[in-house]
Image (cartoon, rainbow, N blue to C red):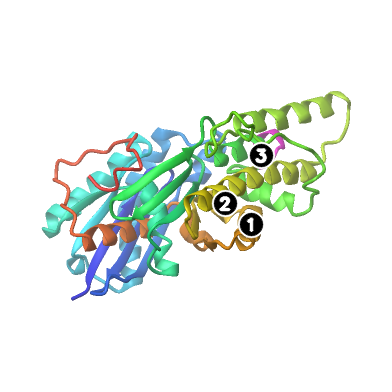
Amino acid sequence: MSRIILGIESSCDETGVGLVRLHDDGAVELLADEVASSVEQHARFGGVVPEVASRAHLEAMRPTAERAFATAGLALSDVDAIAVTAGPGLAGALLVGVSAAKAYAAALDVPLYGVNHLAGHIAVDTLQHGPLPKPCLAMLVSGGHTQLLRVDDIAGEITEIGSTVDDAAGEAYDKVARVLGLPYPGGPPIDKAAREGNPAAIDFPRGMTGPRDAKFDFSFSGLKTAVARWVENAERRGEEIPVNNVAASFQEAVADVLTAKAVRAAKEMGIGTLVISGGVAANSRLSGLARERCEAAGIELRVPRPRLCTDNGAMIAALGAHVVAAEKKPSALDLSANPALPVEIVSL
């Protein structure tokens, strides 16, 4: 008998509610994916303001859930289990989602699963491409995280093999966009500008690629600083800033490092499938270069469609479905949010 899983996501500035059907054979079917974003409220600050995000989640949670149930044609009474992001993320924002999930679980008398936001970004790929090969390599690239992960079991066996030592890739995009006078968040406008620019115009540095650097770790702080200094020097000389060329050259540096390290890790570990997810996975150059390099190396590349790459409730519902299928123990109703939850802990 199939089961309906409700997923709630509130780790940052998106309030997400998703509904999936877990079939008897383990397949997970997406029924609804509704998101309310507070990004416009944060834009004037150039970044996410935690208190603003928390208040936005409070206002959006119930309407977003109602839209999800309407889209799926389901009632609350149809829900068999609830999954909620317990971490990592902003403490206040996480608490809104966890509190809502507890209320639903208690009212419906169904099991509650506190799950890992990062693992959700991997699990969401199964909604589009089916079961994950075991093992597979996942690269999460977002505003807050840049990680390489070995996934032996999405429901409970994930190992970090590399991460950023400073800025995440998405954070670097936001900061460079600000330098170039482009809107927040910086990913889409830089990607758009880069299409009209020359990626070889400026030779920006590739961080953490020296012989003494950790093979699978990342660093984007130096790249961000290099872009800022290049722009400052050009302005000092009275030159007009070639925004498209700067954007293209910056983006090329990011995509080059990310894809080179991911492919190298897959080859060295003998893994034949790479999954790229997270908000930056929607970047056209990253996905394009990854496809080129994976094809050359004989590696299968899986990238969820852009809507699934960004934070959403569907990814949490999908992960919840895999945790339920694996018969993991449900969370207690005194579940707490953990803003620093490590990726190795898939469910609490």
Decide which of 204, 74 is in the foreground and name it: 204
- Give coordinates of residue 35: x percent, y percent: 42, 56
Q: Which amino acid does label 3 sit on?
A: Ala
Q: What residue type is labelled 1?
A: Arg
Residue 63 numbered tag: none
How far apart marks 2 and 3 lie (CA) works out to: 28 Å
Going from the N terminus, do you reach mark 1 or mark 3 first?
Answer: 3
Q: Give the range drawn in magenta.
A: 178-182
Mark 2 touching mark 1, by CB under 8 A? yes
Which residue position holds label 1? 293
Q: Which amino acid does label 2 sit on?
A: Val
Q: On the picture, is 99 further left or further right than 128?
A: left
How far apart marks 1 and 3 lie (CA) works out to: 27 Å
For label 1, the SS is helix
Which residue position holds label 2? 263
Q: Which residue is drawn at 19% across and 53% down?
A: 112
Please give the count of numbered marks on the rendered protein: 3
Which residue position holds label 3? 177
Q: Which residue is drawn at 38% across and 39% down?
A: 89
- Give coordinates of residue 327: x percent, y percent: 18, 59
Q: Is residue 3 above or below residue 63?
A: below
Q: How crowded is mark 2: few (under 14 residues within 10 Å), some or many (20 or more)?
A: many
Going from the N terminus, do you reach mark 2 or mark 3 first?
Answer: 3
Q: Is residue 244 above or below residue 302?
A: above
Which quarter of the rendered picture does the N terminus lie within? bottom left
User: Is residue 254 shown to the viewer in this render?
Assistant: yes
How far apart marks 2 and 1 lie (CA) works out to: 7 Å
Report which quarter residue 245 is drawn in. top right
For label 2, the SS is helix
- Give coordinates of residue 244: x percent, y percent: 78, 46
